[in-house]
Image (cartoon, grey):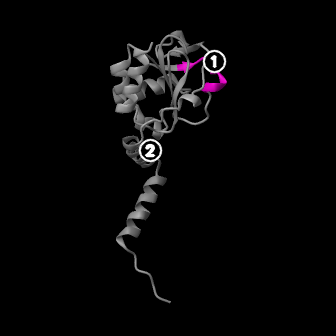
Amino acid sequence: MKKRKFKISDILFVVFILLLIIPQTRTPIQVAVNKLKVVIWSPSIEDEEDQNMVTPFQYAVVDLQGETQSILIGKGKVTFISYWATWCPPCIAELPGIQELYKDYGDNVNFILLTQEEPERVQRFIEKRGYELPIYFPQMQAPEILQENSIPTNYVIGTTGKIVIKETGAADWNSAKVRKLIDGLIVNN
């Protein structure tokens, strides 16, 4: 039986696996892999006949400052809802694109980034990365049509309540396709 020689690729593979096992290096590697996906993956726009409707409702939330708010969803204003977490590599990978979108559309679109985490942890995460995003903590269960067990899950809801985009997993929210869609939804308001 012939003895197998180790190649450089074998060593690199073992090092990569070890880095994934070590908690301090696992998340940065997973975020980097998800950023590659974000570069090539733009959210899918639902076909007109497949767009579900959200019955208008008031979403009860608490913001990072501890203030209770009630945000109208499904009527009058385009809404971007994101279910995310600070420990989620795909969430971390797509946040820069959401930040850019918020910077340009924050006055015309309701941005609602929802998490179930501790406010102090979220505040540290946001400050460390320099994000200025509207982060909220839900105080009610979302309607069934907006419930998802996976994060990140993001929705773009038109002014009439149509769910135009439902995307699970990391995506490029700052793409020309998404911007064109939002521009059209705002104009048709």
For the question of whether residue 30 can be seen, the reply is yes
Is label 2 in a helix, a strand or a loop? Answer: helix
Q: Quadrant of residue 181?
A: top left
Please give the name of the residue rendered at 38% of the width and 17% of the height, measured from the top-left corner.
106
Looking at the image, tell me whether mark 2 or mark 1 is earlier in sequence order: 2
The residue lying furthest to the front in this view is 49
Residue 144 is covered by the magenta coloring? yes
Q: Position of residue 62 (x, y in %)?
A: 53, 14
The residue sitting at 46% across, 59% down in the picture is 17
Give left or right: position of 138 versus 25. right
* Residue 75 horizontal/vertical position (percent): 54, 12
Closer to us: 119 or 146: 146
Closer to us: 8 or 98: 98
The residue type indicated by label 1 comes to Met
Which span of residues is magenta-colored? Answer: 137-146
Q: Is residue 189 rendered magenta in the image? A: no
Three-letter residue code for mark 2: Thr
Q: Residue 140 shows which numbered tag?
A: 1
**Residue at the spot 53% in from the left edge and 32% down from the top edge:** 47
- The residue carrying pointer 1 sits among few (fewer than 14), some (14 to 19) or many (20 or more) residues within 10 Å by Cα, namely few
What is the CA distance from the residue labelled 2 to the residue labelled 1? 30 Å
Q: Are marks 2 and 1 in contact (CB under 8 Å)?
A: no
- Residue 133 in sight: no
Q: Position of residue 146 (x, y in %)?
A: 60, 25
Label 1 secondary element: loop
